[in-house]
Image (cartoon, rainbow, N blue to C red):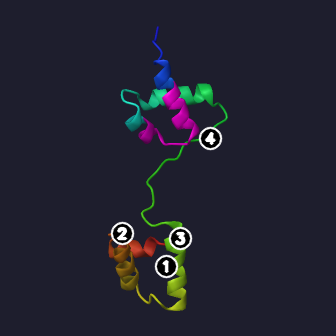
Amino acid sequence: MVRSLPLDVQDNIKSLLKSGHSYSFIIKRVPGVKKSTISDYKRRWFPNMGPLKSGRRSEITATTKSYIRRSVITGKLKTGKDVQRYLCDLGCAIGYCFNRKIK
């Protein structure tokens, strides 16, 4: 028979799941817990909850993307190199080819 986790660990997992944190974040915060354990508890406690956030976070925020779009349309930023310089000034060190992926 499988032993269940201590109640304080279960409560910690439950609160992190309620707040919508990703599996990797929960694994870092709660030592010794595997992804399968978290998904089992999620299924048990929150059967109607949708999937958790997954994938890589964008380095460029939606606000910055819309500002770049507006700046290109109005003519403040004329080339991809200008966009890259602007992003480097903000602290996003990205390559020149990445500029084409900003939509």
x, y (%) of residue 87? Answer: 38, 75
Residue type beneath disc 3: Thr
x, y (%) of residue 52? Answer: 54, 42
Q: Which mark is residue 50?
A: 4
Residue placed under numbered mark 2 in the picture:
92
Up the image or down, 91 lies above or below 58; here it is below
Under tag 3, what secondary structure? Answer: helix
Q: Is residue 18 magenta?
A: yes
Up the image or down, 72 lies above or below 13; here it is below
User: Residue at the location (36% across, 69% down)?
Assistant: 92
Q: Earlier in the sequence, mark 1 or mark 4?
A: 4
User: Residue at the location (60% across, 25% down)?
Assistant: 44
Residue type beneath disc 2: Cys
Under tag 1, what secondary structure? Answer: helix
Residue placed under numbered mark 3 in the picture:
63
User: Residue at the location (46% across, 28% down)?
Assistant: 36
Q: Earlier in the sequence, mark 3 or mark 2?
A: 3
Q: Label 1 to label 4, Cα distance in Å?
A: 33 Å
Give the crowd class for mark 2: few <14, some 14-19, many >=20 residues within 10 Å: few
Is label 4 or label 3 in front? 3
Q: Label 4 to label 3, Cα distance in Å?
A: 26 Å
Q: Which mark is residue 68?
A: 1
x, y (%) of residue 74? Answer: 54, 90
Under tag 4, what secondary structure? Answer: loop
Q: Label 1 to label 2, Cα distance in Å?
A: 13 Å
Q: Which residues are magenta?
A: 11-26
